[in-house]
Every structure is written in structure tokens, then in C-alpha cells.
Amino acid sequence: MLAVSARTRQLNVTCDSSVDREVFLHYSLIPSLFIILVLSFLQRRKNCRQRNDTFYLLGDRFGIIVPLDFLGTFSNRWSYGVAFGATANKIMFLFSEGYQPLEVPQWAQAFVLFIGGMEVGLSYFPFFACLSSEFRLVSSILGFSYSLIWFVVTILQIAECPHGQYLGRFETLVFYWPSLLCLGFLLGRFLYMFIKALPIRLVLEPQTKEKSLLEAHQAEHVKRLLSKPQLHEREKSWFQTRVYEWDPCFQFPSRMIGTLVLASICLYLFIVIEFCVFLLVKDQLDVFEDRLQSYLAHMNETETLTPVILQVQELISVTKGVWVVAVLPASLTCVSYLFHILACYRKHMKRLWAGDKHFLPQKFHRPSSAASVVAIARYSGWQIAYILWGYLIIHVVQSLCGVMLMYSLVLPILHHQGLEMLRGLAVGVLTLSIVVGLMILQVWIAGSFFLQPKLSTADTQKPLALNNRRAFHNFNYFLFFYNVLLGLGACLSRLLISCLLGTWLIARIDRTIMQSGYEGADMGFNAWVGMLFVDHYHTNPVLVSFCHILVTSHRDRKLQKTLKYCYLNQAAGPRFSARARTRWLLLQTLINNPRLVMLRKSKSGHGSQEFTQILPTCSDC
């Protein structure tokens, strides 16, 4: 009773902070719009049309700001991820539909959530815009100032109201320390940007080169493809073979890193909120148990209900204990899913780069282009929602399994019924063993007596050709009636396994839980496949390398034409034939890849047959 009263007193504690984060979110749109206007004014438009109205005074100013390149951004990946992490608290409010800036009827709640999402996105827009802006000095000052405002507001709210009505002491700090940590990281990042940009602005250091279209890891991937494969692979460690192997020729885009960081913080906040709800329910259950105790103490004439009441009390205590214990495995499962999804992303992208689509269902080999473009915007948000809902469902299922385990194994031992429990367990295991043994026996009999011998000793199994047909027909007839009864258990096991796998893999958006032929109904898997194909078409290292070569060669030819480098090249040294260089590169490619010789189109009079005969001898050299 003392604990319940303390909890009740704690629930009545209220605190009025001088700064309300939700109200501040509305007012933060003013500096956010100011920063957007400043960066838009600095941004120049590449294609500027002539106008006859007053807009010609702006020239090529007021370009469109890109907060984050969702397709191929590989620089500042963790900075963008931390910027996403700073929005975790508001994402959770949107997820719980707790943030509603307008009061509207129930049928218009979807529009309110849409407006709320746009407001949150506009409020946190300066973080991403300042990180991606090419005007490093101005964007670092604006980003540092805006991050400092949010950091100070968060510190004031934690300092003025550190305690809460759910967790008690330091509840506000428990909720907002991830956001505070992300804001602190952004302050350091913008300060580092300012320190790096100031000497360049003062002409104390040379200006950095223009960002290349081809990333370093993409170039290394193409070099690996063109190089001769190694005959003996190096030995891998236990961590590389069992857990994860780092690939220097592959990097995850900023979108995946941001999804990982934001999903981790949202999962932490979701677990904290769930624990708060559990404390409220636990208080109500404690009050209910106290009433049951008082009822048993004062009502002696209801002794027939005593066993039922004791069983209810036992069920409540077991459920509370199992629920708390199941938090750890459920959370670890979802955290492992986050990292496993990254591993699956790398594996699937490499298969698509190699032209392998067999890991996808047949209907997903050519997805809709429009749906794939939308999948880029959907994936990150849906992945976070799948992780949160998956944690809740996995937690509930694991709690139910824990309660069943307690009532089937633990409680009988505590109630001195261990022998009866073991006897029942032995009977169940024996029955299941007999059923499985009969199923295995059928397969062994069929393979031993009703199949013809192997055609060759090298065959792994017998051919599908029947032998002893009369005995085979009798075998099928008598087992027909038994298999009808066996099918009842098989049907229930199929349903149970489907439910367990479906609930266990609900958070995995990288694989479908639908049956074959019904994968299109899984919207999460559709978003995953569409996102993979967009990344495949826009970040394929071979395609990006080809475009990089075209851009650089066009730029070099344009520069040579402007400065007349052709005459300088003639005087600088000997000229090389482009045809001879192309033939030499062709020869080197065919030596490293002998199978390509068979795919070449032969031409009469060019000695292609003789070259085909010479090439294997060259490759042996």
C-alpha cells in the first residue's frame, strides 16, 4: 500500500516549464524559413531563362536547396544520421498521433497528421540544408546558431522539469538525452565546418577541388572487377565468417545510415514509453491484488472461491514478471534486425550489380518505375514503423510463450508437481517422436523398396522410377487412412509455424512473409524492392564510372579546345595512336577474361580464329 500511495503521489506531481517544446516548434519555423531563404539566395540556378518581369533583377539567384541526396550521398553519412536522430522525439509523437497542431473532426485526422509531418520536416530542415550546402562558411554559422537554439531549449526543459509523473526522478533526461546528444554532435560538426571553411575564405588555404561524380569506393569496386581473380582466397577470421565481413569497396548511403540511427533511437524511446505504460498498468494490478487480499481476509464465507482467487493472483504475478523479462530478448531481436537489414542491403545490391535477380520473386524482376521512385521516400519511414510494431508484437508473443513455459515447466516444480510434469512431458515427447518416426519410416521404406536401383555409382539418389508396384499400391492404400489423421496435426503445425514466423519476422522489411504468389500484397517488401532498384540504377559503380569517364573526357576536350592544348601536346612528346591503345586494352581485357573470347563477333579477314587460339597460351603466361 505504501508503494501504491507513493506512486499515486508521484502521478500527481506537475511541472510548468518556461519553454514548451511543442510551442517552440511552431516558433522555430521563423528562423528555419530565414535560413532557407538565405541559403536559397546564395544558391545559383544552373539553367536560368530570360524573363521580362521584375524577376530578372534576381539573376540566377534563389536556387532550390537539397537537404539530402537520397540516392547517392556517401559523404557526411553519420552527420546526416545524427541529424535524423535529433528528430526522434517528434517522430515518436507523430507515431503515437500525440502531436496535432489543429483541432479538427475525426475524419480529417489524416490531413492533420500530414500537416504536422510537414511542420516537423520544415522545422528540422536547416540541419540537413546546412550540412549539404556548398557555402560552408555561411551554412556552418547558420547551422551552429540554429542547433545551439535547440540545444539550449532542450537543456532548459530538462533543468526546469527533470522529474516526471511516470518514471519519477530524471524522467525528462531519460526521454531527451538521445536528442541532446545528437544536438551536441551537430554543434561540434558545424564548428568543425567553420574552422575548415574560414582559412579557405581568407585565402590562407587553397580551395577544395570540385566533388567528383565517382566515389573512391566505387572506383575500387570497378578496379576489382577488371583485375584478375585471385586463385587462393585469404583466410577469414571467425568474426568475418560468422558475423560480418567489411568490404572496402562498398559503402552504405546516407539514407541507410540515417534510418539505422533514427530507428535505434525511436526503438529506445518506444521501449521507455512501453515501460511507462507498464508501470501504470502495474499500479492498477497492485490495487486489484490488494482488493483481492482484503476480500479474502474479511469474507470467510466465500472459501470456495479462494483457489480461483489464488490462481488469478498467480497469473497476474507471472504475467508481470514474464513481461519484464521479455523486454531484453525482444529489444535485442529488433536491434539485430537493424544490422541484419544493412547486411541484406549490401548482399542484394551486389547481386543486382552482378545482374542476378533470382533472389527476388519473378513478378519483382521488373518493378514499376513510379512505384520505385515513391519507394525511396517510403522505405525509411516504413522501416522505422515496422521495427516499432515488430518490437511490440514480438514482445507480446514472447511474453505469451514465457507464460506457457512457466505454467508447463516452472510452476509445477514450485508446486511440488515435478513428477507429474515430467510424466506428462515424457508422454508428449514420446508421442511426437513416434509420429515423426513413422513419417521418417515411410520415406525410408519408399526409398528402399519402391525405387529402382541407381543407374551409376556416382548418382546421389535413386531415379524416380517405381519398383514393386503391387506392394507399392498396398502400401499407399493402408497408409491413406493414417495419413488423414496425421494431416490434422500437420495442418495445425503449419498454422502454428506460420504464426510464429510471421510474428517473428514482422519487423523484417527485406523479406516477405507472404506465401509464394502473394508477395505483391506485402507493401513493405514492395518498398524494399523498389528502393533496391532505384539505388541499383543510380549508384551502380560500373554505370557511375562510365558516366564519370564521359563527363571528364568531355570536360578535357572542351578545355583543350579552349586553350589549344592540341599544339602543346604535339610539341611535348610523341603522339600515341588511339586505335593502338584501344586494341591494347582489348587484349588485356580478353587475357584477364578468356570466356569473353567466345562472345566476340568474328569478322572475316581479321584473324579472329588465330587470336582465339593464341589467347589461352597468353593467359597461361
Image (tube, rainbow, N blue to C red):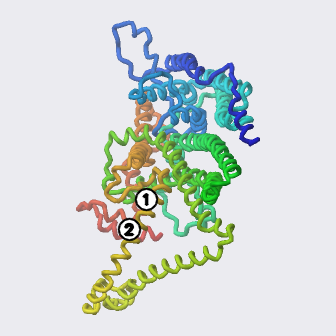
Determine the residue located farthest toward the front in the rendered image.
301
Q: Is residue 157 above or below residue 423?
A: above
Q: Position of residue 177 (x, y in %)?
A: 68, 35
Residue positioned 35% across, 81% down in the render:
482
State the SS at label 2. helix
Specify the quadrant that holds the N terminus.
top right
The residue to which callout 2 is attached is 491
What residue does disc 1 label? 588
Instruction: Decide if residue 387 is on the left or right side of residue 296.
Output: left
Q: Residue at x 60, y 51 (%)?
A: 331
At label 2, the amino acid type is Cys
Mark 1 neighbour class, 10 Å CA radius: few under 14, some 14 to 19, many 20 or more:
some
Q: Nearer the viewer, residue 178 or 213?
A: 178
User: Is 376 situated left or right of 285 in this image?
Assistant: left
Query: As rendered, which of 418 and 431 lies closer to the eye?
Result: 418
Image height check: is 427 above or below 17?
A: below
* Front: mark 2 or 1: 2
Q: In the figure, residue 275 lies in which quadrant? A: top right
The answer to whether 362 is drawn above or below residue 414 in the figure is above
Where residue 269 sits, quadrant-wise, is: top right
Separation (CA) of disc 2 from disc 1: 60 Å
Amino acid type indicated by mark 1: Gln
Residue drawn 52% across and 65% down?
A: 230
- Image coordinates of residue 574 in percent, x first then y, are 46, 44
Q: Which residue is at the front of the view, 349 or 280? A: 280
- Which circle's residue, 2 or 1, is located before the other in the chain? 2
Foreground residue among 380 and 217: 380
Q: Is residue 206 visible?
A: yes
Q: Position of residue 213 (x, y in %)?
A: 47, 38
